[in-house]
Image (cartoon, rainbow, N blue to C red):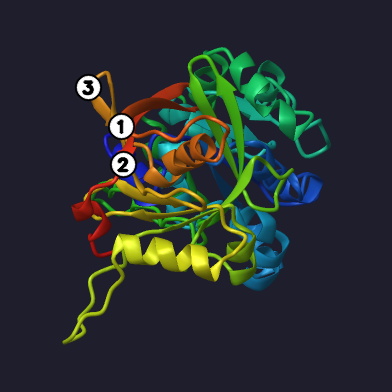
Amino acid sequence: MPLRDRYRAAMGTGARKLLVLVSTWGPESLVRRHPGLAAQLAAHLPYDEYQLALVIHPNERSLLGTYELAERLAPALESGMILPDPHEEWASVLIAADALVTDHGSTALYYCAAQDRPIVSVHPGGGELIPTSPMGVLLDRIPRLQRAEDIADELRAYRQGPGHAAAYAAFAPARDAMDRLRSEVYALLDLAPPTHGVRPRLLPSPRPAARVPAAFDVHVAATTAGVRITRYPAGTGLPGHHLAVEHGAAGEQLARSAGLLYRRPLPASAAPVELGWTADGWTRHALSAYPGCRTAAALLPSGGCLIRVRGHEQTYAAQVEPRSEAGRIVQLDPAVALSAVHSRLVSDQPATDSRTVMNCLVGERAFAIALRPATDDESAQVI
C-alpha cells in the first residue's frame, strides 16, 4: 500500500479514478458474458476523470492468445485501457485502483483485503459460484451493474463493510493464512516444506497503457462557474463541440478534421545541427496546412500555450494554474485547458485584449486559466 502513489504514477493515472475490471476464466466470466463492457465504459466515462484497466485470468489469456485478445479488446485499448501482465502486475494495479468491477472470481478478495473501496458486480449468478463462499456472500451484498452508463451511480451505492468482511472470511486467520496455506500445499504435494521462511518481495510497478488517445471529441458546456470540458476518445461516442487533435500523434485524417490542433514540444535531439519550429511559426503553418482548423496551439516548454485563431489578428497566451488539495498539487494537462480557451475564442464573445481569468471545469474540479495577448518572447519559443 505505501507504493500506491508510485504505481499510479507509473500508469499515468494522476488525479483520475482508476476503475479496474477483473475477470476469471470460463463461460461465466466477465470477458465471456460481457465482452463489450470495457469498450462501453471507455465510451461512457470521461477520459480526464477515469482510467480503465482490465485484469484477466491467465487461463483465459492462454486460451485466447495475445493477438486474439488484442483484437477483441481493440476499442478499449485504443481508448487507453491498461492490460496488465497476469503474473504480478495485476496485483500492483489492484493496489492502485479506486474502484472495481468484478465477476465471481476470487481476485476481488485480494482487492478487498488491501482496501475497502467501491466494488460492484456483473455476475447474475450461475453454477460456478458456491452461494455460501466468501465470494458468494460478497456478491449478495454489493451493487450489481446492469448497464455501463449506470457505473457512477452503482459505485456511489457501495457501502463500506462487505469487502473487508469477505476478505477476512477468505484469508482468516489473517496473520497465519499464508503459513497455513504453504503447509497445506506442500502436504498435498507430499513434499517437506523448506525450513527457512519466505520474505515477500515488493510488487513491480505496472506499465502504462500501450496506446494513449491523441484525438478527442470535446463536449463544452458554459455554466455560471466556468466552462465545463468533457473529453472522450474520438469515435467512441457522439461528436461534441469540437474535435481536438494532437498533431504528430494522431492520424492525418483526424488532424484534417480537427477544430483545435495542438502540438507538444519535441523531445531533445542528438542531431549535431538542430532544426525546430518556433511557436509562432508552427501555429501559422498549421492554419495554412489545415484549412478546416479553427485554432492552432503550441504547448510551450515553459508550461504555457501559444494560441492562434483563424481570423484573429493577435496571438494569445494561456497558462493554467494548479490546484492545491489537502497538501497535494493537482495539475491539469494544458491540452485540456486549450479546449476551454478554444471554445471562448471562437464564440461570439469579444476577443480579449488584456489579461482575463476563466475557469475550466473538469469533473468536480475547477482550474483557473489566465488568458492574454502573447508576448514576442512566447512567440519565439522553440517547440
Question: Which SS class for mark 2?
Answer: strand
Q: Position of residue 181 (x, y in %)?
A: 45, 40
Binning the other alpha carbons within 10 Å of mark 1 as few (below 14), some (14 to 19) or many (20 upward) gives few
Kindly report the distance in space between the C-alpha atoms of the residues bearing marks 3 and 1.
Answer: 33 Å
Q: Which mark is residue 354?
A: 1
The image quadrant of residue 255 is bottom right
Q: Residue at x 32, y 34 (%)?
A: 1
Pointer 2: what residue?
373
Of labels 2 and 3, earlier in sequence is 3
- Could you tell whether 160 is left or right of 271 in the image? right
Q: Residue type at mark 3?
A: Gly
- When the figure is inspected, residue 295 is found, relative to residue 383, above or below; the finding is above
| Front-lying residue, 364 or 69 | 364
Of labels 3 and 1, earlier in sequence is 3
Q: Which mark is residue 301?
A: none
Pointer 3: what residue?
327
Of labels 1 and 2, earlier in sequence is 1
Question: In the rendered image, is residue 255 in sight?
Answer: yes
